[in-house]
Image: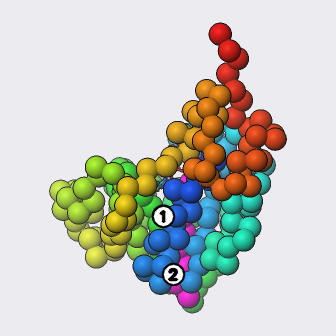
Amino acid sequence: MRIGIYGSSFNPPTNGHLWSANTIAQREELDKVILLPSSSKRTDKNIKVADLHRMEMLRLAVADSNIFEIDDHEMKAISGKQYSYVTMEYFREKYPDDELFFLMGADLLAELPNWTYGEKFIQSTKFIVIERQNIPMGEIIAKTPMLRKYHRNFSLIYKGIVNEISSSYIREEFESGADPRYLLPEAVYWYIKSNNVYLTSEPL
Ligand SMILES: Nc1ncnc2c1ncn2[C@@H]1O[C@H](COP(=O)(O)OP(=O)(O)OP(=O)(O)O)[C@@H](O)[C@H]1O
Ligand SMILES: O=C(O)c1ccc[n+]([C@@H]2O[C@H](COP(=O)([O-])O)[C@@H](O)[C@H]2O)c1
């Protein structure tokens, strides 16, 4: 099987995440995509929403899909130190007979060499990178020595449409009392509303 691993805080999961992962899966003929929510113990990001809420939102987001699966490996880890190299080693042990790919948006590309175990990770992993607006993926690879060295490990996906829906935009919309409905799965939208996951700020 060809399996994609797609990590994010999913705070919340958006139609941008689902559409880009689904597009990658179709074009690269993946059999499944494993969604890997980060733990809120993660030290490099301040994730204010409880793991429980983010996991429930993700479950609702993919409930009717036969391509997406959720893996709680990072979320249930005791340590907040989550390194994708270590995570991929875990998946390689779990799926020894399958071909694994790390999926990510082009915004992460330039910093990849600076990730923990950066070179080991880049050398040992096959990446599928999806375009983000105004980020020249090919140029970044060509201009970054470590990416250039392992360029064979990168497949680049050009979207064909601008889709820049982001979790932070959706959070801001909820927090400011605006309505981001239709940028995220309907069930996730109603979960956020009924549990007040992103608190609306008090009016002045
Ligand atoms: N609209 C999109 N198109 C392509 N890739 C995306 C999109 N939104 C998120 N991603 C990718 O999903 C992965 C996880 O990103 P993350 O969830 O932090 O993105 P985000 O929605 O922009 O979040 P935030 O706004 O909180 O920073 C990254 O690889 C990112 O590039
Ligand atoms: O391993 C690292 O050092 C590392 C540094 C930054 C990001 N990542 C991973 O990249 C994925 C997307 O990250 P982010 O910051 O967009 O949520 C997520 O699975 C993170 O764990 C991993």
Say few, some or many: other residues with alpha carbon within 10 Å of mark 2 (under 14 / 14 to 19 / 20 or more). Answer: many
Q: Which residue corresponds to mark 2?
A: 30
Q: Position of residue 36 (x, y in %)?
A: 62, 61
Q: Is residue 94 above or below residue 146?
A: below
Q: Is residue 5 above or below residue 167?
A: below
Residue type at tag 1:
Ser
Which residue occupies 38% across, 55% down?
162
- Tell me if the residue at label 1 has its CB under 8 Å from ligand 1: yes
Look at the image and name its color scheme: rainbow
Residue type at tag 2:
Leu
Q: Position of residue 74 (x, y in %)?
A: 65, 57
Residue 161: image quadrant is: bottom left
Which residue occupies 67% across, 78% down?
66
Which residue occupies 59% across, 78% down?
32
| Image: magenta residue range | 1-10
Q: Quadrant of the N terminus?
A: bottom right
Q: Which residue corresponds to mark 1?
A: 20
